Structure formats: structure tokens, C-alpha cells
Image (cartoon, rainbow, N blue to C red):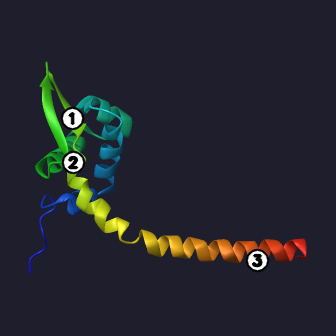
Amino acid sequence: MARAATTADAFNAVAEPRRRQILDVLAGGERPVNDLVDLLDLAQPLVSKHLRVLREVGLVHVRDSGRQRVYRLNAAPLKPVHDWVKGYAQAWEERFAALDDVLEELKAEENGT
């Protein structure tokens, strides 16, 4: 079975840390490419490359505003990612509860109770 292309779905697209950074910035509101370049301290071609991938999977929308291209987040394709991660939430909560129990025991031992 061939490996899915990077642009195949949101899972592949957000696997790249810089793309997640771009989405984090766009979660705060739409931005022109130059703002993303400045905020992330990346070269413009690199930002454009990542935006192209994000656009191809539908995670960002673009509109022209004069000479600028302004990008905004489209979070809907992230729902399958969220749903998948959410499936692990109970396991994390159980581990945190177990850690809380251990910490409470250690605290009680320190206090001599």
C-alpha cells in the first residue's frame, strides 16, 4: 500500500510542526502571508509552501485583498483529528488520576499522616 501524499488529509497536513504553527496563528484571525512570515520568522517561500498544503486539504481559505493574499483558518477538517485524539482522553485522565493518588500519598507521608 502506497503512503498517502502529504496533502491527502488533515492528519498528514498537521503532522508538520510549522503547519501547526501557522494554524495556531490563524486561529487568532485572518492574516496576510507577510504577517505569517514575520510572526514565524520563516522565509516567505517556506510559508507559502506550507499554506499551499493547508489550502489543498481545506484547512485554510484565501482571499485577495488588494495586492495581498489573506489567509484564514477553516477548522472543520480538523474534526476527524480531534475525534481521533479524543478517543485517548479517558486513558490520559486515568493516568492523571493515578498520578494524583501517588502525589497525595507522598504528601501524606511527608506530613506524617
Q: Secondary structure at mark 1?
A: strand
Coordinates of residue 53 in the picture (x, y in percent): 16, 50
Q: Quadrant of residue 6?
A: bottom left
Point 19% across, 49% down: residue: 54
Q: Which mark is residue 105?
A: 3
Q: Is residue 16 visible?
A: yes
Point 31% across, 30% down: residue: 35
Q: Secondary structure at mark 3?
A: helix
Q: Is residue 41 visible?
A: no
Residue situated furthest top in the rendering: 66
- Residue type at the position of mark 2: His
Coordinates of residue 45 in the picture (x, y in percent): 20, 41
Q: Give how far apart the Cα atoms at labels 3 and 1 are.
A: 51 Å
* Residue pointed to by mark 2: 50
* Residue pointed to by mark 1: 71
Q: Secondary structure at mark 2?
A: helix
Q: Residues within 10 Å of mark 3 (few under 14, many from 20)?
A: few
Q: Give how far apart the Cα atoms at labels 1 and 2 are.
A: 12 Å
- Residue type at the position of mark 3: Glu
